[in-house]
Amino acid sequence: MASQRACVPGRDLPPLQRAVEVDRRANVLVPAFDDQPSAERRRWPWEREHHVDAARPAECEVDPLDVEVRREAGKQRVATPNELIGAHDELLRARFTIQQRLPVSFFRLGLLKSNLSTDLLVNLDGVLRTAVNQMSSVFNAQVAITLSQVGQLRPEAHASSTLSLDEKEKSVARWAFENNRPAGRFTETLPLAAAQHLPLLTPAGSVGVLSLRGRTGERPSFDLEILLETFVHHIALVIQREMLDEAAEEAQMLRQSEKLYTTLLNTISHEFRTPLAAITGASSSLLSTGILFTPQAQRDLLSDIYSAAERLNRLVENLLDMSRLEGGRLALKRDWCDLGDLLGSARKRAELPPARLQLSLAAELPLLRLDYVLMEQVFINLLDNALRYAPEASLIRLEATQRANQIEVRVTNAGAGIPPEDLERVFDKFYRVPGTQPGGTGLGLPVSRAIVEAHGGSLHAERPPGGGACLVVRLPGGEAVPPVQEAAL
Amino acid sequence: MSDGPRVLVVDDEVQIRRFLRITLEAHGYQTFEAEAGQVAINRAAQVRPDLVILDMSLPDMDGLSVLKRLREWSATPVIVLSVRDSDHDKVSALDAGADDYITKPFSTDELLARLRVALRHAAPNPSEEVVHCGEIEVDLTRRLVMRGGEAVKLTPTEYALLRLMIQHRGRVLTHQQILKAVWGPEYVRETHYLRVYFAQLRQKLEANPTLPELFITEPGVGYRLVCE
């Protein structure tokens, strides 16, 4: 065999036209095996035609360097000679190994497919990570996936990539992407590159490039090449699906946030306008010439202005708290607090007359480490609500008790109460129990709940057996108060 | 213009300055205005006010810097205007020598009360022997405390705390100022001492300890003894 002359392409070897198109979109042709492999081994197409049988060598020896590169009218690429020869050699050398390995490879491909398809991979990152991992192990290679963005290849490969691409490799990858054709090592374009770059083609266009560099540096066997094509094709489709999903999700989120924004704007402008209308109306009446108000009427108008302004101030405070809470910028300034003190000052700021307050504080309540200003805001909101929805001159009950390691504060009024189906919804921003009079900020309860939760506690609404509404704040009371000493005088 | 106390109003909002001018002049004060920090410092040197109302947020420099510059040469009482969320600013201003603060928005009554207290503390004080505050009466020379005509027994620490608050009645004192004055400089972080002792004082001296009217907590800042 060694003494034989080299095969001459076109004479000893036929043109590669019997190849079967595997992937039209990739414009790649690879040769087909016989459908039924013989007991001995699979045959290459030309072997059947020209009776070149590796097992029974013909008069010439196939030299990889002599095999011509063939294209078909520039549309389709035929598997490169190197690819064919490499695969051929591999088949000759180790066909049994290959035959044993093939099913394993396909099993792995199945695994990849199932992994890629499962819902566990909720996002594109997960898909890419799995693809890189699977490809790295199946092909014993380092792998990089570079996605495209608005028709351009991104400058950096995805973070999960195990292959790092230098500028030269990136330019090869870019070529593969722009031309929708493989490039780099083991291909006919820029074969001096270290890695092989395969465009991730989908019916809708290329979604990126997969770059692969074998750890051994040897060219992959023919079956692995096929496997690679299949992998790449499948990965491309999964990526495309994920990209579409993400785009759809983003659009959905955008729609939701726009809706929320609109709701927020509408509600806020309404909440602002009501007190502003009171202020504008009352002050313009007072300013108007030619009208003589009684001193009592003047005072009434002025007190309307004053309370509308206070309401605006509360609205602004709650809005600020809400934005700080949602922005995650809320740092609690915890310090030791006397709960009785805190409830007392909240009572004052909520303008709840002492005569309408029924206060019951358990003796020996421990000091708590709280953010005084924020927790005061919570109780101002709760008392404010209790007052707003209570019958005139009725009592507001404020109780603080300690149970085991928990402090519980209950604010109860004698109002109509909250319907059972709304007990939770009253904590939604701008939710108002249907049929109740307007006046609140629509933010008091949600802000309060967020503040209490930031303290490790909870806030919920109840329907007490005696009627009315009850808001329950629970706070952890676990921290031991350090000892207190007398001053040295 | 009346010849009442001279007040310099430092605020960049023209509406606030106008409202303060009208209100203060109606109550017999003379007012001067400044709309920025540097102007305020020059104006203060020029008109020598009896009191300065200083907004903490000014266009050219922050209120705290204005206060510090002012304190380099003047002991004029300063009342700081601040917003709710900035208790840190309030404490810094009080520690830098402000006499009191008031949170925007505020009512005129609140402001006038603060002004009176600050002006009183600035006036040379004849040594007081007996001070009345609401229902309580404190005889500072004989260390006697009465409530509604009945003697109240206080521990030495409680008395020291009460005496400090009486001396500065009407004014806010920061946690640090109180701890330093009563317990000593190494105790300025032990704010829980104050929770415990003020609760005790309220228990003994307030008509309704759960709804205090005398010993008022200033959230995040300190305490104020209100004797109106």
Image (cartoon, rainbow, N blue to C red):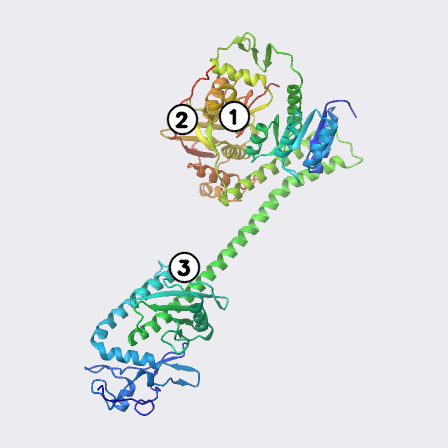
Q: Is residue A320 above or below residue B73?
A: below
Kindly identify the residue that appears in the image at 39 percent across and 68 percent down. A210
- Kind of residue sitting beneath label 3: Ala
Q: Residue furthest top?
A: B142
Dot 2: element? loop
Which of labels 1 and 2 is toward the front?
A: 1
Task: Say whether residue A55 is left or right of residue A13.
Answer: left
User: Is disc 3 in contact with disc 1, using a CB cutoff of under 8 Å?
Assistant: no
Q: Residue furthest left?
A: A39
Q: Which residue is under mark 3?
A: A159
In the image shown, does B90 or A106 lie closer to the viewer? B90
Q: Residue furthest front?
A: A3
What number is the disc on residue A481?
2
Q: Position of residue A178 (x, y in %)?
A: 47, 73
Kindly identify the residue that appears in the image at 22 percent across and 78 percent down. A93
User: Is disc 2 in contact with disc 3, using a CB cutoff of under 8 Å?
Assistant: no
What number is the disc on residue B176?
1
Mark 3 neighbour class, 10 Å CA radius: few under 14, some 14 to 19, many 20 or more: few
Q: Position of residue A46 (x, y in %)?
A: 29, 87
